[in-house]
Image (cartoon, rainbow, N blue to C red):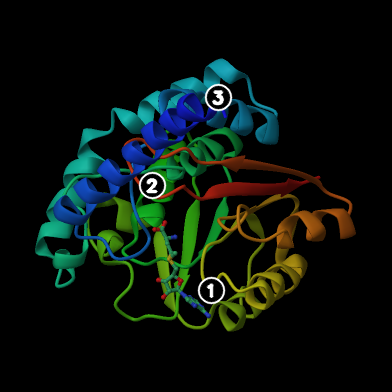
C-alpha cells in the first residue's frame, strides 16, 4: 500500500500524455485512417540498424539515405501541393509525415531493385517515397520502377503527376489478381493492402513464383500478424521486424516485417 501513490502517479503521468496527444490530434488532424506521424529519434536509430541488417548495408550509408529523404524538399512540396488540390484533401494531413516509410526509402536506396511491387496505395504517400528512392537510384545508373496496386480507383492521387509519376505504374485491381498477372521479376515486394490474415497470406503465396532470386519481402502488418514470419520459416528465409514509436501521437504505431534469403 505504501508504494501505491508513487505507482499511481507514474501511470497517471503516462496516461495523461496519451490523453493530451489524443485531444491535440482530435482537434488538429483530419485523418480518419492510415495515420501519419514522425518517429522518435531513438526509433529512427533503431530503423537505421534494422535496414542495415536486412540489406547487409553499412550503417553510415543507411544514415545518409535517411538524411536524404528528410532533406528532400521537392518531394515534400509536391505532396503538400497535390494534397491541397485533391478531392479528398479534407481527410488528409496538411503537413508531411513519413513514419516507417523512410525505412522503405532506405531499403530501396540500399538494394537498388529494378522492380518494386506495393499492394495498397491509399493516397500514394508510400508510393511517392518509394518512387523518390527509385529516381535517385536512376540518377546513379540503377533504374527501377514500381508497380503500385490498389482496388480503389481513387487511390494514388499523390503519384499521378510530378517527376515521381514517371517511375510509377498504377494498377487498379484486386491485389491477388494483379500479382498473378505480373509479367516480370519482382525484386522488392511490399504488402500493405487488405490486412486480413487470409489476404496477406495469399499475397505472399501468389507473388512467390514472381520473385527474383534475391528478392526481399516486406509487410506493413508485422505488429498485427505473424503471416510473414511464418512464411519466412516455411520458405527458408530470415525474418526481422521493426516496430514504430510515433512522435507526439496517440497511435501506438505500425511496423515493418522483412523476409529475405
Ligand atoms: C493502409 S492503405 C495503404 C497505405 C499506403 N501503402 C501508404 O503508404 O500510405 C490500404 C489500401 O489497400 C487497399 N486495398 C484493400 N483491399 C485491397 C485488395 N484486395 N486489393 C488491392 N488493394 C486493396 C485499400 O483501398 C487502401 O487504399
**Residue found at x 64% / y 76%:** 199
User: Quick one: SS at disc 2?
Assistant: helix
Tell me which numbered mark, 2 or 3, is placed earlier along the sequence. 3
Question: Residue 135: percent from the left, percent from the top?
Answer: 39, 43
Gap in Å between the C-alphas at discs 2 and 3? 49 Å
Name the quadrant where ligand 1 sits: bottom left
Residue closest to the far top = 60
In this picture, residue 24 sits left or right of residue 9: left
Q: Quadrant of the N terminus?
A: top right
Q: Mark 1 vs ligand 1: CB under 8 Å?
A: yes
Q: Residues within 10 Å of mark 3 (few under 14, many from 20)?
A: few
The quarter of the picture where residue 88 lies is bottom left
Query: Taking the image as drawn, is residue 149 in sight?
Result: yes
| In-front residue for pair 85/201 | 201
Which residue is labeled 3 in the image?
Answer: 3
- Which numbered tag is attached to residue 194? 1
Amino acid at each position: 500500500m505504501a508504494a501505491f501513490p508513487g505507482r499511481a502517479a507514474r501511470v497517471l503521468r503516462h496516461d495523461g500524455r496519451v490523453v493530451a496527444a489524443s485531444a491535440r490530434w482530435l482537434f488538429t488532424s483530419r485523418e480518419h485512417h492510415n495515420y501519419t506521424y514522425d518517429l522518435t529519434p531513438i526509433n529512427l536509430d533503431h530503423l537505421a540498424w534494422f535496414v542495415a541488417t536486412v540489406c547487409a548495408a553499412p550503417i553510415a550509408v543507411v544514415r545518409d539515405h535517411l538524411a536524404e529523404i528528410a532533406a528532400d524538399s521537392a518531394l515534400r512540396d509536391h505532396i503538400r501541393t497535390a494534397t491541397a488540390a485533391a478531392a479528398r484533401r479534407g481527410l488528409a494531413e496538411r503537413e508531411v509525415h513519413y513514419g516507417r516509410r523512410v525505412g522503405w526509402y532506405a531499403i530501396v536506396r540500399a538494394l537498388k531493385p529494378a522492380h518494386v511491387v506495393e499492394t495498397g496505395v491509399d493516397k500514394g504517400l508510400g508510393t511517392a517515397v518509394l518512387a523518390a528512392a527509385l529516381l535517385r537510384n536512376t540518377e546513379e545508373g540503377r533504374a527501377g520502377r514500381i508497380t503500385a496496386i490498389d482496388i480503389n480507383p481513387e487511390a494514388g492521387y499523390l503519384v499521378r503527376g510530378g517527376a515521381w509519376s514517371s517511375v510509377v505504374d498504377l494498377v487498379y485491381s484486386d491485389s491477388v489478381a494483379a500479382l498473378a498477372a505480373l509479367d516480370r521479376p519482382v525484386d522488392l515486394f511490399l504488402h500493405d493492402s487488405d490486412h486480413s490474415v487470409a489476404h496477406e497470406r495469399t499475397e505472399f503465396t501468389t507473388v512467390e513464383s514472381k520473385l527474383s532470386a534475391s528478392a526481399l519481402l516486406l509487410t506493413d502488418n508485422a505488429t498485427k500478424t505473424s503471416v510473414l514470419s511464418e512464411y519466412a520459416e516455411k520458405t527458408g528465409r530470415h525474418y526481422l521486424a521493426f516496430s514504430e514509436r510515433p512522435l507526439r501521437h496517440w497511435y501506438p504505431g505500425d511496423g515493418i516485417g522483412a523476409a529475405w534469403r
